[in-house]
Every structure is written in C-alpha cells, then in structure tokens.
C-alpha cells in the first residue's frame, strides 16, 4: 500500500529516493506467514471438535517462532494447517503473498516443496539409507539422482553426520535420526521449517544439541523456523517470538521476553509459573529437622537436593552459619505430599552425612 | 523302485505344478495389486477417501474369499473354457486359480500397506509428494518385507490349490495323486506326490523368507 502511494509521486530529488529506499528496507522485514481467522473443526458422525478457532498470527521472515501449549491445545493441528496438510474449516494461511486456500492440489504440492517439516518420531523411510532419505524431497521435485547425492553430502556435513550417508535409520540414535530428518527437510532449500515436537522424544542433552543446530540453520540460511512444543525451555532457548495456544485459541503472543516476563492470561501464567504454583500448594504433612554438624562440607545441599530429587521443599525455619567452609546449624523442612519423593529427599540428605530427624505434627 | 515312466510322470507333474503356480501367482498379482492399493487409499482416512467405492471393493473381496475353491473351480468352467479353450489341463486351471487367489492377495497387500507408519506418509505429503509418488516410493518400498512374506504365503496357497484342481483334471502333482492314489490305490505314488508337494512348499517358503529377511533394512545385521 505504502509503495503504491509513493509511486505516484514524482521522484526528483535524491532525498526522496533515499527515503524510498529506507521504507523499502523496513518493508523487507516482512511477514512471511500470515494466519488469518483460522478455524479447524474435526467432524465425525456424532460430534464436532473445534480444534482451533480465531487464530490470527503473523510470522516474520527469519524468525524462530514458538507455538507452545498443553497437550490437546491444538498445536499439531495448527502446524498442519500452515502447510495445508489439514485444510482449515474457516480462514486461511498466506505464505509469501500466496493464499493457500486458493491453490489447487498441484500448486499446493509445489508450495509444500518450499516448506520443510520435522516430527517428533522423525518419520524417516526405514528401507532407505540416510543419503536416499535426504534426497527424497529432491526426487519428489523431479531432480536427478546425482543432484540428490550431492546435496545429501553437503547437508550431512551441515548436520554433522558426514560419515553416515550409507547407514540405515535403524542404525542411528534418536538424535542422529532427527539430524537426518533436518537434513532431509532442508534439501530443497525451503524458506520455512516446521517442527512439531521435534525434540520431545530426545533426552535433555540431545535436545540442546538439536536446538543449537536449528538455531545455526536459522542464522546461516535465514530460514524461518516454527517450533511446536510443550516445553518452556525449548522456547526460552531459541525462540524470538512465541504464541501460547490454549484450548484452540491464541491466548497470548509476542516477543518471548515480554510474554514470559509478564504473562497476562491464565493459560500463559500456568505455563510460565508452573513450578511456583506447585510451591503455593505445598500440602505435605511431613516435616524434618536437619542438622548441619560441621561434618558435611559447605555445598548448596538444599539447592542440589531440589535439583536432583526434582521436588520442592518448604523451608519453615533455618539457622545456619558458614564456619570455615563447614555448615553448622539446623533447618526445618516441609516435605512434599508424595511419600516416595519425601523418602527420596530423606535418603539424599542422609547420604550426605546430614542428620535427619522427623518432626511429628509440626504443621 | 519306480519305473522310468513313473519317474518321468512325476517330473512332468512337478513341472506342471510349478508352471500353474508361477503363472497363477503372476496373473493374480497383476489384478490384486491395483485392488489392494485401491482398498487402502479409498479408506476413510486414506490418501483418496472414497467411502462408497471402498465399501463395494470390500464386499467384492469378501465374497471372492468366502467361496470355497472347489465350488469356484466348477462354477467358472464356462469362463475357463472361454479363455483357455477347454476346461481341463494345466493352462485352463490357471483361470480359477487366479480368480480364487486375487481377493486373497488383495487382502494381504492391503494389510501390508496398512502397516506403513502413518507418520512417514505424512512426512512425504509435507514434502509435496503426489499420491502416485506416495504409493510407489513410500508405501510399496516401506512395506516391501511384509509384501514379500505375503508373496511367500500366496505361492504356498496357490500351490496347494493347484493340487486341489487335480480333482477336476487340472494336471500337475495333485492330478497324479488323485488318479493313481485315489482311483488306482497306488498309495506309494500318492505318497511320493504328497512328499513332493510338501518339499516344494518348503523350498519356496524358505526362499521367500530369506529374501524378505535379506532385503529388510529395519533390522540391524
Ligand atoms: N483427526 C482428528 N479427528 C478428530 N479430532 C482430532 C483430530 N486430530 C486432533 N483432534 C483433536 O483436536 C484437538 C487438538 O489436537 P492436537 O493434536 O492439535 O493437539 P496438540 O496441541 O498437538 O497436543 P499434543 O501436545 O498432545 O500433541 C484435540 O482435542 C484432538 O483430540
Ligand atoms: Mg501434537
């Protein structure tokens, strides 16, 4: 719109030309994906499930965009609507000024060739080796076998699996499979990469390495990445922007810092404060007194215990001192309601030579 | 033990049995493959949902599978005569064998293709693959092992059906077993034909299973 208005002017001076260039530059930070009034109903014989409604999101070119929400919120449905694997019931998706709802099947397939996708379960072809998996999208796009081989080789270097080109998926670990899936998704040089719970089947260390790889790809090739997840840490680690999906609606969206530092809706608060909410609900009846008699070295015992036992305790009373690197004093802790966890905590502390005594009816 | 004549007859019988089994299997697959694929892709959640067509195909296959082979053998005699020129002999027997085996094979193919992970199909769709590409480059190659195992079962079944066709002069080992063993009480010949049939099935089974295992890339060797 701006451009057409400007074009009507007569551009005579250099200054005006400069302003025009500036405006153009601003316009290039542009919306790549526009999700407009999207609704998706699943209709079966006796019921209709509205999985998504009223979704309006703009995703900028070059961003890493997170979509987070609880299980069943509609995340997978939303990501499948972006490449029209699911046809929206209402509304549309506009990618690069192309309204997907106006395209026929063949045109849609062409658009999809420009959108890579990776999945929680990797979804590699089990009867093809790594190289042939990676070149599969090129095969679909009608490229020659030689070209596929060449591209597979380049991509295997990028994802750090240069020596695995002839391996079969069954010979790879989960993290390696996901790397192959990423290489495959990148083979056609797509502008967009969709990731549906791409790290949910991986352990924390592997998750971090895959996220680092995605970030690197985003930086290096300027690919816009959309990440679906139910894990806060994933969004915090690599996303620029985030949308919180709750029960089929966008509860909140914006810059990650803004949304996470100041969540406004209940859904957002539930995600962001999930840990703190649990503390407020400490209902455990068991309390223990622990004594630091100077035998245990001064390490952050309580903090480590919380991390290792993955449980929270309430410190009801504390009187400790650090004397020459030894902890002296005592503390009263309220244990979680779950007896297993409580036992785990007690054992953890006893293992560290800390005297633990249980207090009856303290709270 | 046996006269040269008998031995020649047994060798010819074996060759006839293999001839019938081979061509029946080939022709039956020619019909069953499209049928099996159609059964899979026209399903409600298939690649090209066509519920009515799917229902019709399903019924045809079920009817075809529930007719006992002996009855089918006799019922299709007019068609057999029309196609093969006569209603008896090895070549003619191929007609009822194909008709009997096609629905059975279609079901086997259907179940093999159904085993392919839905996620892999979705991945192919996300790459912009057409239905044709998905069928030929995803479904069939990914189901390869299961299809080969199915093929092994099919060959065994057709072989035993071909022996049954001996009852109506179908030729091959089954024919010999009926003529000599049943009508002439030459139990030794009947026994040897049965042994030959068992050995044939065993060999074919073994070959099929080996191929299936060898080509399967899902297991680490
Ligand atoms: N094919 C389908 N038919 C009917 N309902 C469906 C279908 N797919 C999804 N749904 C429903 O739509 C809702 C959203 O599902 P979706 O898979 O998008 O959730 P999600 O946020 O990805 O959850 P998860 O984190 O568990 O993967 C759910 O209530 C689900 O039951
Ligand atoms: Mg999901």
Image: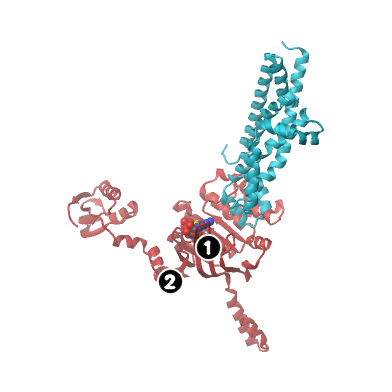
Chain colours: A red, B cyan
Does the Cβ of the disc 2 residue fall within 8 Å of ligand 1? no
Residue B39 horizontal/vertical position (percent): 64, 47
Question: In this rendering, which labeled residue sits more in front, label 2 or label 1?
Answer: 1
Q: In the picture shown, does residue A192 fall above or below B35? A: below
Side of A242 where B81 appears, left or right:
right
Q: In this orientation, which residue lies closer to the viewer: A258 or A110?
A: A110
Residue B10 figure quarter:
top right
Numbered circle sitting on residue A258: 2
Q: Callout 2: few (<14), some (14-19), or many (20+) C-alpha neighbours within 10 Å?
A: few
> Which chain does the residue under circle 1 lie in?
A
> Tag 2's secondary structure?
helix
Image coords of residue A316 (percent x, y):
22, 60
- Give the residue number, with chain letter if any, for mark 1: A41
The correct choice, above or below, for B125 with respect to B203 in the image is below
Give the farthest residue toward the right: B85
* First reached walking from the N terminus: tag 2 or tag 1: 1
Residues beneath discs 2 and 1 located on the same chain:
yes
Residue A215, can we see it?
A: no
């Amino acid at each position: 719109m701006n451009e057409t208005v400007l074009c009507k002017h007569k551009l005579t001076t250099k200054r005006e030309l400069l302003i025009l260039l500036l405006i153009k530059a601003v316009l290039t930070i542009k919306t790549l994906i526009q999700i407009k009034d999207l609704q998706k109903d699943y209709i079966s014989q006796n019921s209709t499930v509205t999985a998504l409604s009223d979704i309006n999101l703009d995703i900028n070119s070059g961003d890493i965009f997170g979509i987070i929400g609880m299980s069943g919120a509609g995340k997978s449905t939303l990501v499948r609507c972006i490449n029209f694997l699911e046809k929206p019931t209402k509304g549309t998706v506009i990618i690069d000024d192309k309204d997907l709802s106006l395209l026929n099947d063949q045109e849609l397939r062409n658009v999809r060739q420009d959108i890579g996708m990776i999945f929680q379960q990797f979804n590699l072809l089990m009867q093809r080796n790594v190289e042939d998996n990676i070149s599969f999208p090129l095969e679909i796009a009608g490229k020659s076998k030689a070209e596929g081989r060449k591209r597979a080789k380049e991509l295997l270097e990028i994802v750090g699996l240069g020596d695995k080109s002839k391996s079969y998926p069954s010979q790879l670990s989960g993290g390696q499979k996901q790397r192959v899936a990423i290489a495959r998704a990148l083979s056609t040089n797509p502008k967009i990469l969709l990731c549906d719970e791409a790290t949910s089947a991986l352990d924390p260390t592997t998750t971090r390495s895959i996220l680092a790889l995605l970030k690197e790809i985003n930086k290096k090739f300027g690919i816009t990445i959309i990440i679906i997840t139910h894990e806060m840490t994933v969004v915090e680690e690599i996303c620029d922007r985030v949308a919180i999906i709750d029960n089929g609606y966008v509860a909140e969206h914006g810059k990650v810092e803004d949304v996470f530092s100041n969540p406004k809706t209940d859904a957002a608060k539930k995600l962001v404060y999930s840990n703190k909410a649990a503390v407020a609900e400490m209902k455990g009846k068991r309390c223990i007194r622990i004594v630091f008699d100077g035998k245990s070295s001064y390490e952050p015992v309580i903090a480590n215990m919380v991390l290792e036992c993955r449980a929270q305790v309430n410190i009801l009373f504390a009187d400790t001192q650090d004397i020459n690197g030894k902890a002296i004093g005592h503390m009263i802790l309220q244990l979680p309601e779950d007896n297993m966890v409580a036992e785990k905590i007690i054992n953890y502390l006893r293992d560290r030579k800390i005297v633990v005594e249980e207090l009856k009816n303290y709270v | 033990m046996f006269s040269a004549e008998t031995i020649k007859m047994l060798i010819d019988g074996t060759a006839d049995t293999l001839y019938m089994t081979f061509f029946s299997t080939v022709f039956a697959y020619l019909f069953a493959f499209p049928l099996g694929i159609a059964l899979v892709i026209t399903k409600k959640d298939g690649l090209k949902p066509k519920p009515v067509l799917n229902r019709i195909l399903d019924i045809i296959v079920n009817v075809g599978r529930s007719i006992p082979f002996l009855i089918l053998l006799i019922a299709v005699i007019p068609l057999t005569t029309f196609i093969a020129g006569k209603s008896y002999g090895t070549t003619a027997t191929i007609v009822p064998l194909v008709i009997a085996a096609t629905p059975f094979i279609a079901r086997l193919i259907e179940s093999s293709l159904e085993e392919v992970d839905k996620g892999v199909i979705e991945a192919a769709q996300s790459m912009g693959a057409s239905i044709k590409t998905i069928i030929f480059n995803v479904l069939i190659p990914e189901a390869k092992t299961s299809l080969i195992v199915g093929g092994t079962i099919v060959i065994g079944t057709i072989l035993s059906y071909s022996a049954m066709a001996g009852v109506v002069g179908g030729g091959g080992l089954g024919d010999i077993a009926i003529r000599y063993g049943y009508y002439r009480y030459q139990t030794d010949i009947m026994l040897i034909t049965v042994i030959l049939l068992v050995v044939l099935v065993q060999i074919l089974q073994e070959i099929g299973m080996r191929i299936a295992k060898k080509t399967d890339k899902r297991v680490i060797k």
